[in-house]
Amino acid sequence: MHYNLLNGAGATATLYGWATVDFQDLGGIPTDSRNFITQISMLAKSSVTTITNKPGGFQGICALASDADLGSYYYGRVYFTNYVGNVILSKFVDGVESLIVTTPTTIVFDRARTYNMSLIGSYTPRANPALTLTYNLVYNNETNTVTLVDEHPLSGTRFGYRSCNNSGTMQVYWDNLRVSSTAVIHPGTIVVIN
């Protein structure tokens, strides 16, 4: 998939773009939810500032979104403030960021590179499951990771990607969106392997 974010309103404008897919068998009530892995590749090109490689925005994966408008969702993303930046994992509830974990990147940004991302969700098998989310940004053999634990998981069923461009013109190329899941094995569950 490819789309452009064009800023016609000046340098103070913030433009957003996203796409999600509804997976009815993922998300929902945490006690009935499945562990998941969402993966995607991304290449971002921006005209922001005189620093050639500065991307000027956030690029990342959304999970367990409540609706197509991303009312409540988890967002694992990279924000390159220059050649380096931060990997960030957040929980948004009704559009307000309520949990956030961030760490600096060691991976540097270059607009000619394609980066791989994954967002992994694992539920704790108990009566009131917690959700552990791990966001990975990967280039070649290097990985930057950030992890968040939510004791009150969201119950949306939409997964996808989201871009935010702070200024200038941004071209973002997304490819290879994959979502997979596995059952949560609760204590006392019998598993039969043939």
Image (cartoon, grey):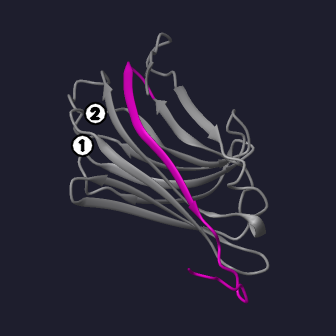
Q: Nearer the viewer, residue 68 or 95?
A: 68
Q: Secondary structure at mark 2?
A: loop
Q: Quadrant of the C terminus?
A: bottom right
Q: At which x and y percent is residue 100?
A: 56, 58
Q: Are marks 1 and 2 in contact (CB under 8 Å)?
A: yes
- For badge 1, the amino acid type reads Tyr
Q: Nearer the viewer, residue 39 or 150?
A: 39
Residue farthest toward the bottom in the current orientation of the protein: 188
Sequence order check, earlier mark of 1 and 2: 2
Q: Which residue sits at x=37%, y=23%?
A: 171
Q: Nearer the viewer, residue 3 or 1?
A: 1
- For badge 2, the amino acid type reads Lys
Q: Which residue sits at x=22%, y=29%?
A: 51
Residue farthest toward the top in the current orientation of the protein: 8
Q: Name the side, left or right, on which 166 lies relative to 116.
A: right
The disc label shown at residue 54, or none: 2
Instruction: Decide whether residue 145 is among the magenta residues.
Output: no
Q: Name the side, left or right, on which 91 lies relative to 156.
A: left
Rendered image quadrant of residue 55: top left
Q: Quadrant of the N terminus?
A: top left
What is the crowding at mark 1: few (fewer than 14 residues within 10 Å), some, or many (at least 20)?
A: some
Q: Name the side, left or right, on which 105 lies relative to 192.
A: left
Q: At which x and y percent is residue 160?
A: 55, 41
Residue farthest toward the front in the current orientation of the protein: 194
The disc label shown at residue 19, or none: none
Q: Which residue sits at x=75%, y=55%?
A: 155
Q: Nearer the viewer, residue 97 or 107?
A: 107
The disc label shown at residue 83, or none: 1
Q: At which x and y percent is residue 19?
A: 57, 32
Q: Is 76 situated above or below 4?
A: below
- CA gap between label 1 and label 2 equals 6 Å
Residue range corresponding to the magenta coloring? 166-194
